Image: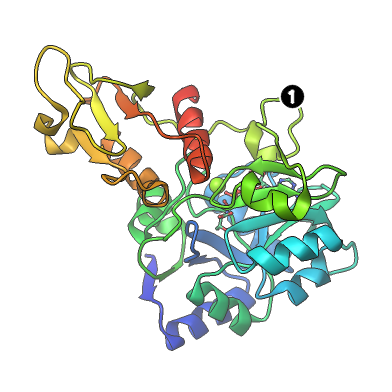
Amino acid sequence: MTIIKTASAESINDAAQRLRDGDLVVIPTETVYGLGANALDGKAVAKIFEAKNRPSFNPLIVHVADKHEAEKYAVMDDRARAVAAQFWPGPLTIVLPRRMDSGMSDLVSAGLPTIAIRVPAHLTARQLLKGAGIPVAAPSANASGEPSATTPQHVIDSLGDRVPFILADGACKVGLESTVLDLTGDTPCILRPGAISAEDLEPLLGTVVYEHGETEKPKSPGMLLKHYAPSVPVRLRAVDVEKGEALLAFGSTRFMGVKGGGFAKDLPEDSFRNLSETGDLHEAAANLFSCLRALDRPEHTAIAVMDIPKTGVGIAILDRLERAARGR
Ligand code: TXA
Ligand code: MG
């Protein structure tokens, strides 16, 4: 049985103690829920890989309470410090050379000489990290290959009894996994787009490139893996709806017709979701994984997705949708 506790001073203490004891704890963050373990304890970290069925070559993100903690485990240069000063706490993970004598479990980095580290902004996560006094390795709290969990219910649906304890704190505000920024080379490189975009980073870093992960040996091992794809096809940039399709809308659907007659507004409730009626990209990001899960039903021939602007967090939304469309 999974214990689910709503975040409070008491349950945060309980969760901190469990982490120190080497147990798994599902933690809320502003991006997605994380499956956390003490990053200094190899046995605890191994439980993450087992519960998620995650390949051991895929390294984990380490969560710390503040940038001083980050310095203990990662070698931060001026660029890293500048980015951390502006975007931490927040939905940004930085890949840096790791300190070899820091006590960090080797499993965390999956054999790489680097470490991915972030200071989350979520209040509960921050209190937990401070209270636990240890760095917490945490991938998204979903079985490998499934969409990230943005509510406690998603965690239960995906991992069920494989997680002993969930610190529950509602739906995640950002809804997409953090931006992963690689600062180990001369040119800053985004390995995974997120709410913080290249445009946001360029004033501090100059040119930032985006590695799509389609190369044979991507810098982010996770990009090699098959990503979430619904059990029905995903059709992008739809301008109308075919009979039998579900519609994932963005913005006004006034002009969306259903082929053979009818309008989007006439679709059955289970076949229609709108990421954001007002066309707000941040709202769309927060709703993306819930909407995809809701429309992933065998009676649909496909999920038609309306076009989403390729700017700001729209780039990250399109990245997840393109992976969903390709993944089958
Ligand atoms: O928002 C997030 O980042 C969430 C929350 C819980 O913080 N975590 C998350 O973790 O999305 P995960 O494990 O699902 O994704 C981590 C990504 C993977 O693609 C992994 O390959 C990459 O970061 N990564 C981790 N360490 C790395 C490293 N040292 N070098 C390159 N990529 C790394
Ligand atoms: Mg993940």
**Residue under the point 67% across and 31% down:** 213
Q: Is residue 52 left or right of residue 301?
A: right
Circle count: 1
Residue 307 shows in the view: yes
Judging depth in this view, the residue of 230 and 188 nearest the camera is 188
Residue situated furthest front in the rendering: 203
Q: Secondary structure at mark 1?
A: loop
Quick one: 286 or 103, which is closer to the camera?
286
Q: Quadrant of the N terminus?
A: bottom left
Q: Position of residue 228 (x, y in %)?
A: 47, 35
Disc 1 under 8 Å from ligand 1? The reply is no
Residue 40 placement: quadrant: bottom right
Q: Residue at x 53, y 35 (%)?
A: 319
Q: Residue at x 50, y 45 (%)?
A: 313
> On the image, numbered disc 1 is attached to which residue?
216
Rendered position, 109 above or below 104: above
User: Is 88 placed left or right of 303 in the picture?
Assistant: right
Which residue is most to the bottom?
A: 10
- Would residue 160 be found to the left or right of residue 141 on screen? left
Q: Residue at x 60, y 44 (%)?
A: 54
Percent position of residue 320, x then y: 49, 36
Could you say where residue 211 lies in the image, as x and y percent from the top left?
70, 34
